[in-house]
């Protein structure tokens, strides 16, 4: 879609078949050459492969041991998976990619990283210590037809975290974080404790806050008052660790199939579960947009990285004093950042972590760094300025043309229909299965008020009804909607049934429920059934 001739004139745009093809081609033709020239892959992230563009949305679960990560996966799928172990001690000692497959089984890490169809080939850089603790659990489950789930080892405390792993745990998590669609941090409400190691892991994921969600799990084990305190403590701790003005979305509940120990907050847990399920179910629909967003972030980092390498190369002497100059440049890297920021009008947030850059630069030969390559930088600039906008329109076209994609099966089906649908029989849905009109229960008290309003020909005017309805102290926008729902025959007046209906809807709203967009059939007054105005 986006080829240019050598003299700078635009060719007719090449049409991509889909967004995935467009992302792959843009990366290979425009971004990868810049990354390769300036050693981006040695400093930041391995090169992307075809599987990175083709794979299903992935969900990464992170948490200390015994926070319920593995149980959460089992709850979503309603099925055990190969390699699953659950217990109060640190049971999951491996990274397990739970993926769809016709045949149930386990693929070990060393075999997994040579499979071109799986997006894990670049993980071989972390060595055998990691690969021996990495596997893919394949099973035929409907949930996994739309998403893949990554289970991680419980984050340990103290020296265990640093010594016993044998590989860079935080670096592996960061690798996954760059490629997944959602990161879920799990905490145990019953024993909330954020260790220093967990804090370090969360900070390592700092550039991916947009993907991050928090689950306060096992919340049924404590009462309402204690839950409020735990929630407040969690938000305070996260605010200090993540250090952003935006509040991370926290879902409260108990994500397993056991009876609730303390059922006081059942409705809250149900609502939170539905919100979290809705978030996960949206991932297939937003997958292309997420990949586009990640490519933009990667391109911005690659561009800044190139400017850093160019600046270091430019400052190096041609003959004498190379080692001392290298040490000086590394020590003064912040000054180089500031100069690049001013010269190229780049946001400070686009720069890589200075400490990590300094550590890697110590082992680099600055003399082998390339000098400025304008065409490579211009290609990435053009990609960000023009190609991405065109690809964005293609994303919107694909979303409009394709049927709604969502995660199906497992726990996602449990509350989709029937009486256990969230909110069924509550609020405006109360009385949905009753033979008697639900409003009849309170109609005698509503009739007393109705006849004090001096009805004419059995009806009260809008002005008279308003005097009574405003006593609810609901805003006019809400009362206006209630009036439209209650005036079933649309004649601008309310008879006794319609007036009772209006008061019932006011009660529904005052109890904290949402009003329906249209009047449900079970709320239509008996005398008006079959006569509703269009």
Image (cartoon, rainbow, N blue to C red):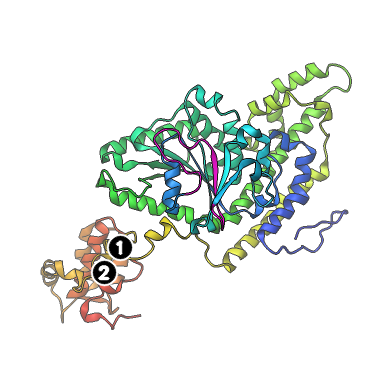
Q: Depth check: give the residue in front, 401 or 175.
A: 175
- In the displayed image of the protein, which residue is found farthest to the bottom? 531
Q: Position of residue 410 (x, y in %)?
A: 43, 57
Instruction: Please rate how many residues cluster around mark 2, counting C-alpha atoms within 10 Å: few if below 14, some from 14 to 19, many from 20.
Output: some
Residue at the image point whose x is 39% and y is 41% from the top: 216
Q: Where residue 29 sits: x, y (%)? A: 78, 51
Instruction: Where is residue 172? Give x, y as percent.
Output: 60, 36
Q: Is residue 234 above or below residue 420?
A: above
Q: Tell whether 102 sits left or right of 3.
A: left
Between the residue at mark 2 and the residue at mark 1, the CA separation in whole angstroms equals 8 Å
In the displayed structure, 491 sits above or below 184; it is below
292 vs 271, left or right, is right
Q: Which residue is mark 1?
A: 424
Left or right of 275 in this view: 205:
right
Q: Residue at x 77, y 28 (%)?
A: 312
Residue 274 vs 86, above or below: the answer is below
**Count of numbered circles on the image:** 2
Whether residue 227 is in magenta: the answer is: no
Q: Under tag 1, what secondary structure?
A: loop
Q: Earlier in the sequence, mark 2 or mark 1?
A: 1
Q: Position of residue 502 (x, y in %)?
A: 23, 68
Predominant SS of the magenta segment: loop
Q: Is residue 144 left or right of residue 277?
A: right
Please say whether residue 391 is visible from this viewpoint.
Answer: yes
Residue span colored magenta = 81-104
Residue 94, magenta (yes or no): yes
Residue contact between numbered discs 2 and 1, judged by CB atoms under 8 Å: yes
Write down the quadrant of residue 15 in the picture: bottom right
Residue picked out by circle 2: 432
Task: Give the quarter of the figure containing the N terminus.
Answer: bottom right
């Amino acid at each position: 879609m986006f080829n240019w001739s050598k003299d700078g004139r635009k060719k007719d745009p090449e049409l991509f078949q889909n967004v995935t093809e467009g992302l792959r081609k843009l990366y290979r033709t425009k971004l990868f050459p810049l990354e390769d020239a300036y050693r981006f892959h040695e400093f930041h992230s391995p090169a992307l492969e075809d599987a990175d563009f083709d794979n299903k949305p992935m969900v990464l679960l992170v948490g200390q041991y015994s926070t319920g990560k593995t149980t959460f996966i089992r709850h979503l799928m309603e099925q055990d998976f190969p390699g699953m172990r659950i217990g109060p001690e640190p049971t999951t000692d491996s990274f397990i990619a739970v993926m769809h497959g016709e045949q149930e089984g386990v693929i070990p890490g060393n075999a997994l990283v040579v499979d071109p169809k799986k997006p894990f080939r670049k993980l071989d850089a972390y060595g055998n210590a990691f690969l021996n603790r990495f596997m893919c659990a394949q099973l035929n489950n409907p949930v996994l037809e739309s998403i893949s789930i990554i289970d991680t080892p419980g984050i340990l405390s103290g020296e265990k975290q640093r010594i016993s792993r044998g590989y860079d745990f935080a670096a592996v998590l960061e690798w996954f974080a760059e490629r997944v669609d959602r990161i879920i941090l799990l905490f145990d409400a019953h024993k909330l404790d954020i260790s220093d190691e967990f804090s370090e892991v969360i900070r390592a994921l700092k550039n991916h806050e947009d993907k991050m969600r928090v689950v306060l799990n096992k919340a049924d084990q404590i009462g309402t008052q204690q839950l409020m305190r735990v929630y407040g403590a969690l938000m305070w701790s996260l605010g200090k660790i993540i250090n952003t003005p935006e509040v991370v979305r926290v879902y409260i509940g108990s994500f397993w199939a056991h009876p609730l120990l303390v059922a006081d907050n059942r409705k809250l847990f149900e609502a939170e579960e539905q919100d979290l399920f809705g978030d996960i179910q949206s991932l297939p629909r937003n997958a292309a947009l997420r990949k586009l967003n990640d490519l933009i972030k990667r391109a911005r980092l690659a561009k800044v990285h190139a400017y850093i390498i160019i600046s270091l190369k430019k400052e190096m002497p041609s003959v004498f004093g190379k080692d001392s100059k290298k040490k000086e440049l590394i020590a003064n890297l912040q000054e180089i950042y500031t100069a690049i920021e001013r010269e190229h009008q780049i946001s400070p947030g686009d720069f890589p972590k200075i400490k990590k850059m300094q550590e890697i630069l110590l082992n680099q030969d600055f003399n082998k760094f390339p000098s400025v390559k304008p065409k490579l930088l211009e290609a990435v600039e053009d990609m960000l300025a023009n190609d991405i906008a065109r690809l964005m329109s293609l994303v919107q076209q694909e979303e409009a043309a394709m049927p709604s994609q969502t995660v199906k099966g497992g726990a996602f089906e449990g509350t989709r229909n029937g009486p256990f649908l969230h909110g069924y029989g509550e609020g405006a849905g109360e009385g949905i299965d009753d033979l008697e009109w639900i409003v009849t229960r309170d109609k005698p008290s509503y009739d007393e008020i109705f006849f004090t309003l001096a009805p004419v020909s059995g009806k009260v005017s809008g002005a008279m009804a308003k005097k009574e309805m405003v006593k609810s102290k609901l805003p006019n926008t809400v009362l206006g909607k209630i009036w439209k729902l209650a005036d079933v025959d649309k004649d601008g007046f309310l008879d006794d049934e319609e007036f009772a209906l209006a008061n019932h809807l006011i009660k529904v709203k005052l109890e904290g429920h949402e009003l329906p967009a249209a009047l449900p059939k079970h709320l239509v007054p008996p005398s008006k059934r079959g006569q509703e105005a269009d």
